[in-house]
Amino acid sequence: MIRAEGVAEVTDADFEAEVLEAELPVLVEFTADWCGPCRMLAPVLSAVAAEEADRLKIVQIDVDHNPETVSKYAVLSTPTMIVFRAGEPVKSLVGARPKRRLLEELSDVVTPAGA
């Protein structure tokens, strides 16, 4: 799996604890080694993870090794990003995008600074 720096990897086994029970909103990237757009997205996620660490947790899950979670959330293509807040999916984004656009798209689900 293409690891984005500063982004943790989750599995079917720890998805509930790491994502559904997290205090912060969590952006989960469903990714795979063979996914070209996922490679393009990795540095974007690393940058966002560093900038938004106090307001947003970012994790990756490998679609080839975690079929239970992939099936549960009906992920059909990579990269798919799903934002979870209070254990519920609140936003879904498909495909790579530049950092500025990703931040704009996340603005309504990320906790405002100081809130």
Image (spheres, grey):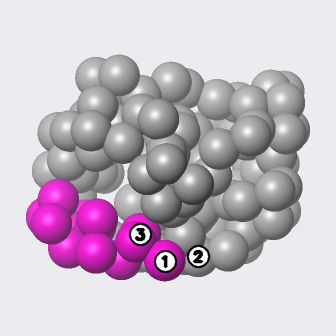
The disc, 1 or 2, on the residue closer to the chain's N-terminal end is: 2
Q: Which amino acid does label 2 sit on?
A: Lys
Nearer the observer: mark 1 or 2; the answer is 1
Disc number for residue 108: 1
Q: In the rendered structure, are the residues bearing label 3 and label 1 in contact, judged by CB atoms less than 8 Å apart?
A: yes
* Residue 5 x/y as whole percent: 28, 23
The secondary element bearing badge 3 is classed as: helix
Q: What residue type is labelled 1?
A: Asp
For this view, does 39 lie left or right of residue 81? left
Vertical arrangement, residue 109 with respect to residue 13, above or below? below
Disc number for residue 91: 2
- What whole-number distance in Å separates the C-alpha atoms at marks 3 and 1? 6 Å
* Residue 96 x/y as whole percent: 25, 65
Nearer the observer: mark 3 or 2; the answer is 3
Q: Mark 3 points at which residue?
A: 106
Vertical arrangement, residue 63 with respect to residue 95, above or below? above
Furthest-front residue in this view: 114
- What whole-number distance in Å separates the C-alpha atoms at marks 1 and 2? 9 Å
Q: In the rendered structure, are the residues bearing label 1 and label 2 in contact, judged by CB atoms less than 8 Å apart?
A: yes
Query: What residue is shown at x 68% (from left), y 59% (from top)?
Result: 84
* Residue 92 x/y as whole percent: 55, 75
From which residue to which does the magenta span run? 96-108
For this view, does 19 lie left or right of residue 21? left
Q: In the rendered structure, are the residues bearing label 3 and label 2 in contact, judged by CB atoms less than 8 Å apart?
A: yes
Magenta residues: mostly which secondary structure? helix
